[in-house]
Image: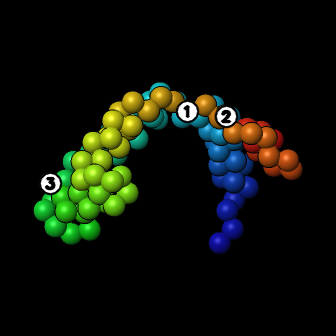
Amino acid sequence: MAIPRAVEKALDEEVSRFLKSGPTKEELGRIKTSSYASFVRDVERIDGSSGKAAILGESQLYGGSRDFYRTTLNWLRDAPPPMCAMPPVPGCRMACLS
């Protein structure tokens, strides 16, 4: 199914804005809240692929300690709105990257 040109244009404009300016303060706040809420829902479970055991296991595996999840939560809490600081990519049509 082809995407109508107007939708494709709007999507390109939004992606370009995002790459140029990063998320707005409100957008960043929403994703922080959503990510934290997801973590809380996951930690309430005891087993399964996203419960306490999985969180502790992933923390140990990827962070080297079972409480590494605390570090990732701090990163989420302290994340500033990012600015596009990528080096130029020759031939890229995205304004932020070229």
Of the numbered discs in the image, which one, if any, rests on residue 61? none
Instruction: Provide residue 33's location: percent of width, then percent of height.
Output: 33, 38
| Residue at image location 14% in from the left, 54% down from the top | 44
Amino acid at the residue labelled 3: Glu
Of the numbered discs in the image, which one, if any, rests on residue 44? 3
Regarding residue 41, the answer to whether it shows in the image is: no
| Residue at image location 34% in from the left, 61% down from the top | 61
Amino acid at the residue labelled 1: Pro
Labels 1 & 2 near each other (Cβ < 8 A):
yes
Instruction: Provide residue 50's location: percent of width, then percent of height.
Output: 26, 62
**3 sits left or right of 93 in the view:** left
How far separated are the C-alphas under marks 3 and 1?
A: 31 Å
Q: Secondary structure at mark 1?
A: loop
**91 sits left or right of 8 in the view:** right
State which tag comes first along the sequence, 3 or 1.
3
State the residue position of label 2: 85
Q: Residue furthest bottom?
A: 1
Amino acid at the residue labelled 2: Ala
Labels 3 & 2 near each other (Cβ < 8 A):
no
Number of labelled discs?
3
| Camera-nearest residue between 74 and 6 | 74
How far separated are the C-alphas under marks 1 and 2?
A: 8 Å
State which tag comes first along the sequence, 3 or 2.
3
Q: Secondary structure at mark 3?
A: loop
Residue 97 to residue 54: above or below: above
Q: Give the quarter of the figure containing the N terminus.
A: bottom right
How far separated are the C-alphas under marks 3 and 2?
A: 37 Å
Instruction: Provide residue 75's location: percent of width, then percent of height.
Output: 39, 37
State the residue position of label 1: 82
Mark 3 Cα within 10 Å, few/some/many (few <14, many 20+)?
few
